[in-house]
Image (cartoon, rainbow, N blue to C red):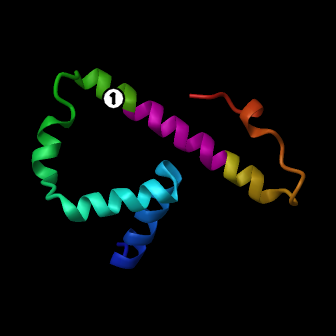
């Protein structure tokens, strides 16, 4: 089980990776400023989508994460400056 500090750190890294540092900070400010009910949000998150559509989205996301993991493993295993062009080596989503 992760500690609160680990969850917080991983969450911030995910926000920064997805939004960039400036928009990640804006997002945090927005969350603090406006009340957010996660339970209510979840009720409408997948509204109008079939189980098959949600499953396809999940599989695409999983495949993308696997490619990123492999890309990171390749980059970490090679000396700096010798990384292959992973964008060409691995198919895009």
Residue 7 lies, with reference to residue 21, above or below; the image says below
Name the foreground residue: 31 vs 65. 31
Locate residue 67: give its quadrant.
top right
At which x and y percent is residue 28? 33, 62
Left or right of 30 in this view: 11: right
Left or right of 37 in this view: 31: right
Q: In which quarter of the image is the C terminus?
A: top right
At which x and y percent is residue 49? 22, 23
Which residue lies at the image location 38% right of the left edge and 29% below the top edge? 57
Left or right of 37 in this view: 64: right
Name the foreground residue: 82 vs 31. 31
Q: Quadrant of the N terminus?
A: bottom left
Secondary structure under tag 1 reads helix
Which residue lies at the image location 70% right of the left edge and 53% below the top edge? 73
Report the span colored magenta.
58-70
Name the foreground residue: 57 vs 24. 24
The crowd level at tag 1 (other Cα within 10 Å; few <14, some 14-19, many 20+) is few
Which residue lies at the image location 35% right of the left edge and 56% below the top edge? 27
**What residue did someone put label 1 on?**
55
Q: Quick check: is 90 in the magenta stretch?
A: no
At which x and y percent is residue 38? 16, 52
Residue 40 lies, with reference to residue 61, above or below; the image says below
């Amino acid at each position: 089980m992760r500690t609160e500090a680990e969850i917080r750190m991983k969450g911030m890294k995910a926000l920064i990776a997805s939004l960039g540092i400036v928009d990640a900070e804006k997002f945090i400010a927005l969350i603090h400023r406006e009340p957010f009910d996660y339970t209510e949000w979840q009720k409408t998150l997948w509204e109008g989508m079939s189980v098959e559509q949600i499953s396809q989205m999940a599989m695409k996301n999983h495949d993308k994460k696997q490619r990123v993991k492999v890309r990171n493993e390749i980059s970490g295993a090679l000396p700096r400056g010798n990384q292959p062009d992973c964008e060409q080596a691995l198919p895009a989503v």
